[in-house]
Amino acid sequence: MKLSYYAETDSLYIEFAPDVAKDTREVVRGVVVDFSAGGRVVGIDIDHASRIVDLTTLEAVDIPLRRSMLRAEGER
């Protein structure tokens, strides 16, 4: 997952997969969801992000790591 903030437009894009969006839907005013050809969510764009979410903190809780990531860091 990749988070990208664009200050010039005050928008936050959350990319779940690097797939190309084939369909885009505004689910609520200012929140647009991008879908792959297979209907999978590939990203979410939030307009006026600083008014909607706290951009000063990012917290990841209970994120499962793949074994390959753990081995790369020297853990087993």
Image (cartoon, helix red, strand yellow):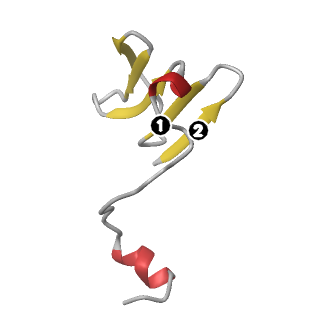
Q: Quadrant of the C terminus?
A: bottom left
Q: Residues within 10 Å of mark 2 (few under 14, many from 20)?
A: few
Left or right: where 44 falls relative to 39: right
Residue contact at pointers 2 and 1, CB within 8 angstroms: no
Question: At which x and y percent is residue 75?
Answer: 42, 88
Q: Residue at x 59, y 38 (%)?
A: 4
As displayed, is residue 68 above or below residue 11? below
Sequence-wise first label, 2 or 1: 2
Residue at mark 2: 4
Question: At which x and y percent is residue 22?
Answer: 41, 21
Amino acid type, callout 1: Ile
As displayed, is residue 64 above or below residue 30? below
Q: Secondary structure at mark 1?
A: strand
Q: Residue at x 48, y 31 (%)?
A: 20
As displayed, is residue 37 above or below residue 70? above
Q: Quadrant of residue 27?
A: top left
Left or right: where 50 falls relative to 42: right
Q: Secondary structure at mark 2?
A: strand
Residue at mark 1: 14
Pick the residue in front: 72 or 23. 72
Question: At which x and y percent is residue 69?
Answer: 44, 74
Q: Residue at x 39, y 9 (%)?
A: 29
Amino acid type, callout 2: Ser
Left or right: where 18 falls relative to 67: right
Q: Residues within 10 Å of mark 1 (few under 14, many from 20)?
A: some
